[in-house]
Amino acid sequence: MSSGAGAAPKPPSLSEGVSFGGYKVALKADMPSPGFVFEPYRVPEPIPFWKRLFTPSGWSRTKEDAILQFMNAFTVSKLRKKIGYNKKQFQEQAFNIYKEVNKLIARGDIPSLQKALTDDMHSTVKNEIRKRQSKWKSVHWELVEPAVSIRTLKARMITLDKNDLNKAYVQLTLEFITKQKFEAYNSKREVVSGDKSKEVLVKDIWVFERSLFHPGAYWRVCARITL
């Protein structure tokens, strides 16, 4: 099918490289990472409106929330200046990575996963795959597109030099709500878990990380958050 002038660009696959801000960069498996998630996302504790307005604890909470929002805005502003960040474009790219990483996990393709994950995350996923393979011979995984929703929950920057804010890593936390199909098989191809005829609503929270100062840097998954 030919693409019209107004057609939306298709997000690239991991094997093609990552396109961001109009530039395509090659994927490398040796990109360094801080090795931790800075201020992992957690669901904010609900606070009544009256408590925010009329109590010291409410005033303190409002101040804390304002600081957190400022940190989000500062990180996004830095991304826009450095790499031409666009929220919609990034979410499309992140969803493409989410989809391909899950496909590779289902196939048990540990070497290919190294391109999309930080070293620590790759080690975690590798152990999960080996544990699964000791229980099930193979699995069927399918994503029902489009995603139900994609939200950016948090944006944080890890600076390595307080005098040079360009020498930093950025971590964006995204929530994916999708419909998926899953089925697991034993060595005789008998179904032992799941049902690929049924759609299951799944919520995942993933952290994507990118260096702002390494040549050829690109977004990778550095963590999954369980609430």
Image (spheres, grey):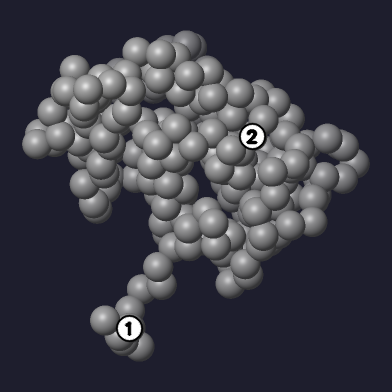
Q: Is residue 79 visible?
A: yes
User: In the picture shown, does residue 135 fall above or below 91?
Assistant: above
At which x and y percent is residue 8?
36, 73
Mark 1, Cα crowd under 10 Å, few <14 / some 14-19 / many 20+, is few
Kind of residue at badge 2 = Thr
Residue located at (26% from left, 20% from top)? 186
Circle 1 residue: 3
Circle 2 residue: 118
> Which of the labelled discs sits on residue 88, or is there none?
none
As rendered, which of 154 and 174 lies closer to the eye? 174
Residue located at (21% from left, 46% from top)? 144
Q: In which image quadrant can residue 122 be found?
A: top right
Q: In which image quadrant can residue 81 be found?
A: bottom right
As rendered, which of 143 and 77 lies closer to the eye? 143
- 3D distance between C-alphas at marks 2 and 1: 35 Å
Judge from the rendering whether residue 60 lies leftward or rightward of residue 4; answer left or right.
right
User: In the picture shown, does residue 131 fall above or below 80?
Assistant: above
For the C terminus, the image quarter is top left
Residue located at (58% from left, 60% from top)? 17
Q: Secondary structure at mark 2?
A: loop
The extreme bottom residue here reads 5
For the N terminus, the image quarter is bottom left
Q: Secondary structure at mark 1?
A: loop
